[in-house]
Amino acid sequence: MRTFLALAATGLMLGGCAEPETSTMAGPGGNTIHTSRCTTSPEGCYTEAAKKCGSTYQVVDSYSKAGGTLADVTPGPVTWYYMTYQCGKSDGRLPSFAFRGPQYTPPKTTQCTQHGKTTSCYHY
C-alpha cells in the first residue's frame, strides 16, 4: 500500500508540473501547424506557442479532455488542454478549450457497518 501511495504522489507531482508537449505537421497550404498538449491549466499552451513562434501566433483549434496524471489515454481526474496554432499574425481568435470526449466518473465509495447479524451498506 505504501508503494502505491508513493507512486500516486509522484504521478500527481509530475502531472502538475509537466512541460507542455508540442507536435508539428505540415498544413494544407504548406505552412507549419503546431499542437501543444498541456496539463493543469491552458497557460502552458500559451507559453509554449509564444516560445515556439517567437511572439504572435494564430489559434487554429483548441479543446480539453479528461485524462490521468501522467497521460490522457483514458478518462481521469486531470484536465488536459490541446491548442493547435500556426506562427504569424494573429486573427484575434482566442482558444475556447471546449471539452471533448468522455467524462471522468470517480469510483463509487461503499461504507458498510455491521450491527449484530445485520449489515448496512451506503454507496456514495
Image (cartoon, rainbow, N blue to C red):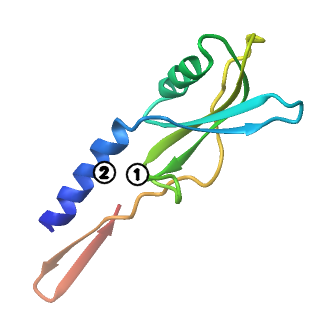
Count residues near mark 1 (Cα–Cα under 10 Å), then give few for <14, some for 14-19, many for 20+. some
The residue wearing badge 1 is: 70
Three-letter code, disc 1: Leu
Residue 85 appears at what percent x and percent y?
70, 27
Asked whether, in this view, residue 122 is left or right of residue 114, the answer is right
Asked whether, in this view, residue 91 is left or right of residue 77, the answer is right
Image quadrant where one finds the C terminus? bottom left
The residue wearing badge 2 is: 11
The quarter of the picture where residue 15 lies is top left
For image coordinates 66% across by 24% down, the residue present is 95
Count residues near mark 2 (Cα–Cα under 10 Å), then give few for <14, some for 14-19, many for 20+. some
In front here: 113 or 24? Answer: 24
For image coordinates 48% across by 57% down, the residue present is 105
The quarter of the picture where residue 58 lies is top right
Q: Are marks 1 and 2 in contact (CB under 8 Å)?
A: yes
**Residue 90: which numbered mark, if any?**
none
Q: SS of the residue at dot 2?
A: helix
Q: Is residue 92 above or below residue 6?
A: above
Q: Is residue 41 above or below residue 69?
A: above
Image quadrant where one finds the N terminus? bottom left
Residue 115 appears at what percent x and percent y?
12, 79
For image coordinates 49% across by 42% down, the residue present is 79
